[in-house]
Structures are given as structure tokens and as C-alpha cells.
Image: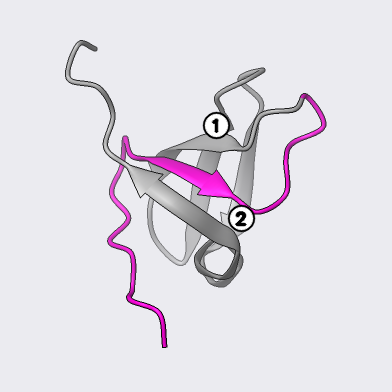
Amino acid sequence: MAEKLNFEVGDIVKLKKPHPCGSQEWEILRVGADFRLKCMGCGHQVMVARKLVEKNARGLRKPESSR
């Protein structure tokens, strides 16, 4: 089994399918049973079940420290 990703608020997660705006990267705003994600392309926010995020995550990176 693949290693578990450690999701934290502020991290950038790359998902399998792109958002309709074209971006595949999402900023994590809330972590719990559901995640609140903000599209890095258009700023749209969605609530997604943790299970779906874990299943469809293709990468995780920490935000740049210049924020």
C-alpha cells in the first residue's frame, strides 16, 4: 500500500483530475473528516470527503515560505 500523506492546513495538494478552470492544485484550508480546498487557479472553494482526497491525491507540497 502507498504511504499515507500527512495533510496539514496550508499545504498544496495535486489531485488526479483538473478543476474546470484547468488547475490541478488545491490549497488545504481545513482538515478533518472533510477537507475544505481552494483551487489555486480560480479561487473556488469546495468541501471534499477525506477519503476522496486521499484516494485522488497525486502529490503534496508545503507552501512557499514567502507568504
Mark number displayed over residue 38: 1
Residue 52, x across and y down, in percent: 61, 66
Q: Quadrant of residue 9?
A: top left
Is the magenta region chiefly helix, strand or loop? loop
Magenta residue check for 18: yes
Earlier sequence position, callout 2 versus callout 1: 1
Query: Which range of residues does the magenta coloring cover?
Result: 1-21
The amino acid type of the residue labelled 1 equals: Lys
Position of the C terminus, as image quadrant, is: top left
Front residue of this view, candidates 10 and 23:
23
The residue where tag 2 is placed is 48
Position of the N terminus, as image quadrant, is: bottom left
Front residue of this view, candidates 53 and 14:
14
Q: Residue at horizontal 52%, vertical 45%?
A: 14
Q: What secondary structure is marked by label 2?
A: strand
Q: CA distance from mark 2 to mark 1?
A: 11 Å
